[in-house]
Image: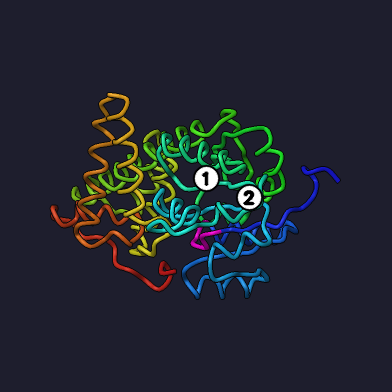
Amino acid sequence: MTAATTSPVIGLVGLGAMGMGSARAMLEAGLDVIGCDISPAACQAFEAAGGRTVASPLELAAECQVVVLVVVNADQVEQVLFGAQGEGGLAERLAPGSLVIQCATVAPSFARDLETRLNGMQLELLDAPISGGAVKARSGELSVMSSGSEAAYVKAKRVLAAMAANVYRLGDCAGPGSSVKLVNQHLAGVHIAAAAEAMALGMSMGIDPDTLYDVITHSAGNSWMFENRVPHILKGDYTPLSAVDIFVKDLNIVHSTGRELKLAMPVAGSALQQFTAASGAGFGREDDSAVIKVYQRLGSFSLPAANDEGAQ
């Protein structure tokens, strides 16, 4: 069989909400997946779903030809691939010709540098940030904003088919994938902050929040983030599906990239300040819709309380 049809052994590092969903979707697509996470509970959950796990990313090198990184940030990518404080990492142990699929939101400059470093070790990189949330990860319906060499795409074919409903090929080298993801995160962060501010405005004027949600989702002011995140507020349930601190990180990358380009980004900067304020107030690990609590603390309205039906 050709490389495109042979099923490789997949190592997936990062069994959080998105990584776990993608790992299970791959299993159900018939792929041989080995998971790895620092959380024993996450590893146990993946094993209960029929997957295999290892205790350290280094252990993946002996079996895996493809490694998927669904970690939080560039620092974690660096640690997994190259080790901490000069210690060896996974990259130096992978067989030549192996593929790294990097799914975290990182600066485009980091993605380009990573490709150069991995190519120097005879490894391929697919710059492949993902979007769609935990639900679409679980169903294998993510959007993948990708860029890389033709060889990387050939090796990634079966993995991408199991993970995603939409795979956007944006360039033949690393960088464009991460660039488009930054545009997405800019909009996502701004829309969540705007949705929180709009709901705060409505509730401050005495409008019933459920009624307000119904009207806006059937009107021109609606957005995907308003429709998706405001129900968390209505239920008083801030269980983190995507946390406040994720947008502190991502909007900081957006803002830093704007500075590199000498492009003023005041709207992104305003949203970043709101998420930073929410994190500083102790809501960093709550769902990103908890940014509304900043407005509540400064205003005179009450937020809906948690209820048994809404709690996850």
Residue at the spot x=47%, y=53% of the render? 82
Q: Nearer the viewer, residue 161 or 192?
A: 161
Marks 1 and 2: CB-CB under 8 Å?
A: yes
Residue at horizontal 48%, vertical 41%? 114
27 left or right, relative to 135: right
Number of other residues with Cα within 10 Å of mark 1, as a class: few under 14, some 14 to 19, many 20 or more:
many
Is 55 on the left-hand or right-hand side of 296? right
Is 72 displayed left or right of 145 in the figure?
left
Residue 4 in view (yes/no): yes
Q: Is residue 222 visible?
A: no
Work out whether 182 lies above or below 20: above
Which secondary structure lies at badge 1? strand
Q: Secondary structure at mark 2?
A: helix
- The residue stretch that appears in magenta: 13-18
Residue 62 vs residue 6, the one in the foreground: 62
Q: Which mark is residue 163?
A: 2
> Please, what is the three-letter code of the amino acid marked with disc 2?
Met
Quadrant into which the C terminus falls: bottom left
Q: Which percent across, then down, holds residue 171? A: 57, 28
Q: Position of residue 211 (x, y in %)?
A: 35, 51
Q: Nearer the viewer, residue 308 or 116?
A: 116
Residue 94 on image: x %, y % = 62, 53
What number is the disc on residue 73? none
In the picture, the disc for residue 130 is: 1
Q: What residue is rendered at 54% in x and 59% in y? A: 13
Residue 72 within the magenta-colored segment of the rendering = no
Q: Is residue 227 left or right of residue 46?
A: left
Q: Amino acid at mark 1?
A: Ile
Residue 127 location in percent, x, y?
54, 39
